Image (cartoon, helix red, strand yellow):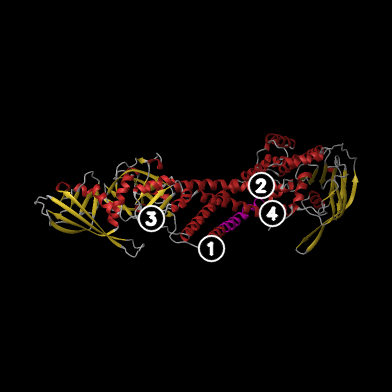
Amino acid sequence: MSLLTLKDIGKIYVSKSVVSIGIRGVNLSFDRGEFVAITGKSGSGKSTLLNVISGMDTYEEGELLIENSSTQYYTQKEWEEYREKYISFIFQDYNIIESCTVLQNVELALFHIANRQERRKRAIELLERVGLSNQLHQKASKLSGGQKQRTVIARALAKDSPIILADEPTGNLDSATSKEIIQLLKEVSVNKLCIIVTHNFDEVEEYATRHVRIFDGGVEYDHVVKPNESTENHQTEEKVKDISTKISLKNSFTLGKTIFTSRPKLSTFMCAFLIVAILILYGATIIVKEFFEDLNYQPTYFTPSSGRVIITTPDGSPISDETLTSIQEKTNAKDAINFDFLLDDHDFNQLYDNEKNETSARILRLDYEFQGDYGKNIYGRYPEKINEVFLYLPIGSKVDYSPEELLNQSIILEGNGFYDIVGVKYFRDNRKKGKALLTREGFDVLNRMVYLNYHLSSSSVNLSINQTSYTRYLRNFAVTFTEEKKVYVNPHSFEFIEESKPIEQLEMNFNFSFVQNDYDYQDDPTFQIQSSLTFSSTDISTSIPTDIIESTSMFEPEIVLSLDVLEELAQQAIYSHYHQASLFYKNNRVAKDKINTLKDMGYIVSLSNAKKTYLSDSADVFIEIMGIAIYLMFIVSAALFIYACTAKSFLAFKSDISIFRSMGIKTKEIKIAMLFRMLICLIPSFIFFAILSILFVYVPILNRTLPFFYLVDYLLIIFGMIFVSLFVTSLQLKKLYKISVKESLKGEIE
C-alpha cells in the first residue's frame, strides 16, 4: 500500500473571470523511504503540485489518497488534521515567524513532545545540525536569507512527520551549505517520504531515488534513479496517533504566551486599547444603572431596613410596652421599639463647628444600634449617655471633616438640642445615607422631643402663679438632660412675671392641638390633649441659665423641660395616640416568615420596604427587558468598537496563523492560543480597573464622585469585557479560516 497516491489530480485557478490551469491529469504514487526530486521550468506547476499534496491548496479534479484513504471530500478541519499528522513543509520564501526567535520557531513544531525541557533540548540539537547554535535567541526578522532558510528546515525536521515537502530548500544558500542541507534531509528522511522541488537536479542527484519532471501542468517524466532503501517500519501510524494526542491545552497556552510576547509593541497597544474599552464599558454601565434606578424607583412608606416589620392595631389603640415585649418574645424578634416614627424621619441634621461657630447641613438617618453591630475599627467610642451620638458616615464625608475634627464637634439632631459626637465610622457604599446613632435611652428621649415639637401645630401653657392665671403660646420649647424634675421659664417670653415677687406655687396646664401629616389626611385630623402638672417653687425657675440655652438648641427656647416632665407629657400625648411599633428580625426572609404569625395575633403588618406605589407585573417585566436590551446594545456597540479597532492589529498575526496552519498545528489549539493571548491582553485592563475601583471606593473625594458599584456590577463589567473580546477574536479567526492556507499565506484576505 502506497503512502500517497494522486489520481488524475487537477488544479484550476479562477481570478477576475480568467481561468488558468495549475496542474492537470497528474498520476503519481509515493511510498516511505523515497527521496523524490521534482523539476521543471518556472510556472510549470511544481509548487502547485506541492501545495496540493500538502493540503494547503485544494484540487478540483481527480482524487488524492493518503494510505489508501480518499481526501476528495475533506473539510477544512480535516485538511488541518491531515497536515498535522502527515506533512512537514519547507517553503521557498521561508514563511518564518519573524516576530519569534529562532529557538521559538523550532519549538512550535515540537508540541508532540509534552515535556518542555525535552522540547527545548530537541530544538537546540536540530539548530546545531543546521549551523544556527549561535543564533538561538535572535529574532527571525534579524536573520539573513540563508539563516532563515536553515531555521525553517530545522522547524520542518522537528515535526518528525511521515512526509517532508521542500520547495526550493536551497535556493537561498551557498553551494557548500546547500549540500549539507540536502544531505541532512536525506538522513532524516529514512523511512519517510521526502519530496523536493528544485530547479537543479544535479544538486540532489547523488541522494535522489526518483526524478519527476513537470511540464505545462502535467507529468512529463517519472524515472526511478535508484531502488527505495526503506526498511520495514510499523511505528509510523502509532507515532502519528501519539502526535495528535500529545498536543494539549497546555501547549495552547504556551503558544498563546509566545504570540503575546513575540510582538511587544502590538501587545502593549492592545493592552492600552482594552484599558480604554473597559473604561467605556464602565461608563456605559453607570449610565444604564442610574437611568433604570431612576425609572424603577418606587418610594416606600417607611425607611427600608433589613428585617424590620411594622405593626399597628386595627382600631388605632396604642401598643403598650408590655404588649410589645410579649410579641417580641413570642415571635423571637431580636429587638423591638415602640413609637418608632423617628426611624422614618429624614430631616436635616446640622453639624455645629465649635471652632468656627457655624453649622453645616447634612442628611442623616436617626437610629440606635448595639455596639457589636459596627465592629471595633472605629474612631472614638460608642455613645454611653443620652446626649452623645455616634456617626456612621459615607467615606466621602471625610472631604469635609476628618474623624479627629468630628470628634470635637456637636450635632443638632432634628433641631432639638446639641449632641456630642463621641465616635465615628465610615462606610464605602455611597448609595446609602449616613446614620446618627444614639443610645437606646437617648433615642427614646429624642423620639418624644421630636414628636411634641414637630407634630403639635399649636401649644399653649397656662400658668397659675400664686392663684393668678396667665396664658402664653409656645413657639419653641426644649428639653435639658438633667436628672431633676425641673421647668425653666424664659422671662423674655413671660414679661408679666415679676421676678421680685416670691413664687409660692406654680401650676402649669399644657394644651396641645395635634394635626396629622399632610400626606395622611383623615376625617378628624385634630384632637385635644390637656396635661395638668403642678410644681412647687423649688421646681420652677423664671430664668433659663445660659449654659442650658446653649446646650439645648441654636434658638432661644421659651420654656425648658427636664426629662421627667417630658416623660409625663409623652405619657399623655404620645401614649394616648401613637399606635405603631417596629419589630426587628435577623433579615427580610425571617421577617416575611413572621408576617402571618403577627396577622394571626390581630395586627396590621407591613415590611419596611413595602412600596408606596406599585407597578404592574407586566410593567416590571417590561422595565427589566428594556434594561437588558439597552445594556446589550452597549455590549454590541463595544464589540463593534473593539472589532473595528483590532481588525488591523489582528492582520499582523495573519501570516503567523497561516504558518501555524501550514505546520499542522491544530485549528483548535491555534484558536485557544489566540483567545488566551487576548485574555493576557485583558489582564492589565483588569488590574487598572481594579486599582481604579479601589481608589473610587477608598479615596473620599473619588468615592463621592461616582455611584458605588457592588460585586455583581464589577463582575458584569469584567465578564462583559471577556465576552466581547473573545467574541471579536473568534469572529476574526472565523474570517481567516474561511480561506485556504495558500491564499492566507499570499495575503489574499479581505
Image height of 173 relative to 713, above or below: above
Secondary-structure class at tag 2:
helix
- Which callout, 4 or 1, points to the residue nearer the camera? 1
Secondary-structure class at tag 3:
loop
- Residue named by callout 1: 618
Q: CA distance from mark 3 to mark 4?
A: 74 Å
Secondary-structure class at tag 4:
helix
Q: CA distance from mark 4 to mark 2?
A: 15 Å
Pointer 4 with pointer 2, Cβ within 8 A: no
- Which callout, 1 or 2, points to the residue nearer the camera? 1
- Which callout, 3 or 2, points to the residue nearer the camera? 3
Q: CA distance from mark 1 to mark 3?
A: 34 Å
Few, some or many C-alpha atoms within 10 Å of disc 1 (few <14, some 14-19, many ≥20)? few
Label drawn at residue 736: 4
Question: Which region is colored magenta?
Answer: 634-653
On the picture, is 138 further left or further right than 442? right
Q: Amino acid at mark 4?
A: Leu
The C terminus - image quarter? bottom right
Few, some or many C-alpha atoms within 10 Å of disc 2 (few <14, some 14-19, many ≥20)? some
Residue 103 x, y percent position in the rendering: 68, 39
Q: Earlier in the sequence, mark 1 or mark 2?
A: 1
Q: Earlier in the sequence, mark 4 or mark 1?
A: 1
Q: Earlier in the sequence, mark 4 or mark 2?
A: 2
- Residue named by callout 3: 313
Few, some or many C-alpha atoms within 10 Å of disc 4 (few <14, some 14-19, many ≥20)? many
